[in-house]
Amino acid sequence: MFLYPPALKVAELSKQRGIVRDRRLYVIRNARLDPDWAEVERRTLSIAGRAIASLIQTQGVGDLYQIYAETQRDSIDFNLAYIPKSFFAPHKEDFDTDYMKKLFQTGHDLAAKGYPWEKLPPGL
C-alpha cells in the first residue's frame, strides 16, 4: 500500500499553513489473525490448497505490518479490528447465513462495550 501524495508531505504542508489535525487510520480485517490449524489429507491437491490458504493468511498479516509501518512513518494513529480468537462457529459453506449472523452478533457485542481497537498488528 502506497499513499500518494506522501502523507508526510501533506502533514508538513498542513503545519506550515497552521492546520493541525489528528490523523487516524481504522483497519477492519474480516479474518482471524491467529494461526488456523487444520488437519490435511496426504494428497497433492489437499496439501496445495492448504498451502495457498496459509499463504493468503500470512500475506494479510504482512499487509497489516506494512500499513502499520506507514502510519508510524507518517504520524498517523493506527487502529485495528479483526475477528477475535474467542469467536468459534462452524463455517459450513461460503455463504453460511448462520455463521454470518453469529459473526455480526460478536462484532455488535464488542462495539456495544466500546470496541477495544488494537494499536499494533499481531506479534509486535
Image: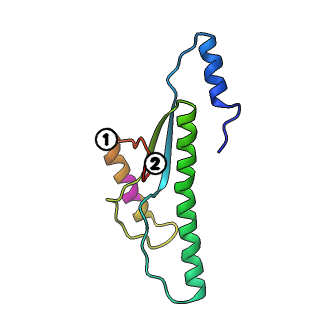
Residue 43 lies, with reference to residue 79, above or below; the image says below
Image coordinates for residue 16, horizontal then vertical, percent: 63, 12
Residue 45 painted magenta: no
The image position of residue 3, as x and y in percent, is: 66, 37
- Disc 2 marks which amino acid? Pro
The one of 29 and 9 positioned closer to us in this rendering: 9
As drawn, the residue found furthest toward the top would be: 18
- Give me the residue at 44% from left, 73% from top: 92
Location of residue 20 in the rendering, given as x and y in whole percent from the top left corner: 53, 16
> Which disc number belongs to residue 121?
2
Q: Amino acid at mark 1?
A: Ala
Q: Is residue 83 above or below residue 17?
A: below
The residue range painted magenta reads: 101-105
Q: Residue at x 40, y 43 (%)?
A: 118
Secondary structure state at the residue bearing disc 2: loop
The N terminus: image quadrant: top right
Badge 1 local density, few (<14 within 10 Å), some, or many (20+)? Answer: few
Return the residue at label 1: 112
Work out how far the residue at label 1 is from the one at label 2, CA to CA, in angstroms.
Answer: 23 Å
Answer with left or right where residue 74 lies relative to residue 35: right
Q: Nearer the viewer, residue 32 or 6?
A: 6
